[in-house]
């Protein structure tokens, strides 16, 4: 489906209300604009974060456990090693 938007003074783009509702864009949302050649893609900041998180999960693979628990265990091991050296 095609929509028409208008570029107004100051370089502002008016996105049609119907399209804003369909995409869930709300007043005050942070939007990310990506350029692909001569085309633009507009996404919400939260949508962009979700896409980056999904890509990282894909690249890293599933992680079982808790990063916080791993960090605490590492710090305790380092502290114990320091105590043994002292």
Image (cartoon, helix red, strand yellow):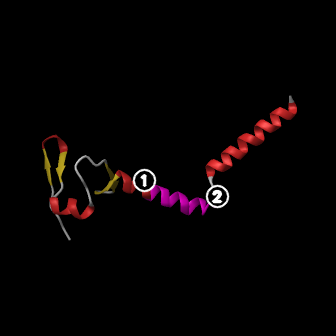
The residue under the point 49% across, 61% down is 54
Q: For the residue carrying disc 2, how many other residues have a C-alpha within 10 Å: few (<14), some (14-19), or many (20+)?
A: few
Q: Which segment did they paint magenta?
A: 51-64
- The earlier-in-sequence mark between 1 and 2 is 1
Mark seen at residue 37? none
Secondary structure of the residue carrying numbered label 1: helix
Vertical order, 16 against 73 (above or below)? below
**Is there a contact, CB below 8 Å, between mark 1 and mark 2?**
no
Secondary structure of the residue carrying numbered label 2: loop
Picture coordinates of residue 49, whole percent (x, y): 42, 53
Query: Splitting the image into 4 quarters, where does residue 65 fall?
Result: bottom right
- The dominant secondary structure in magenta is helix
Which image quarter holds the C terminus?
top right
Residue that carries the numbered disc 2 in the rendered image = 65
> Between tags 1 and 2, which lies in front?
2
Residue that carries the numbered disc 1 in the rendered image = 49
């Amino acid at each position: 489906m095609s929509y028409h938007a208008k570029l107004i003074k100051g370089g502002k783009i008016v996105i049609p209300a119907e399209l804003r509702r369909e995409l869930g864009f709300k007043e005050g949302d942070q939007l990310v604009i990506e350029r692909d050649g001569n085309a633009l893609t507009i996404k919400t900041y939260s949508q962009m974060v979700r896409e980056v998180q999904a890509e990282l999960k894909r690249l890293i693979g599933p992680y079982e456990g808790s990063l916080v628990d791993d960090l605490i265990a590492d710090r305790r091991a380092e502290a114990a090693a320091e105590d043994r050296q002292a």
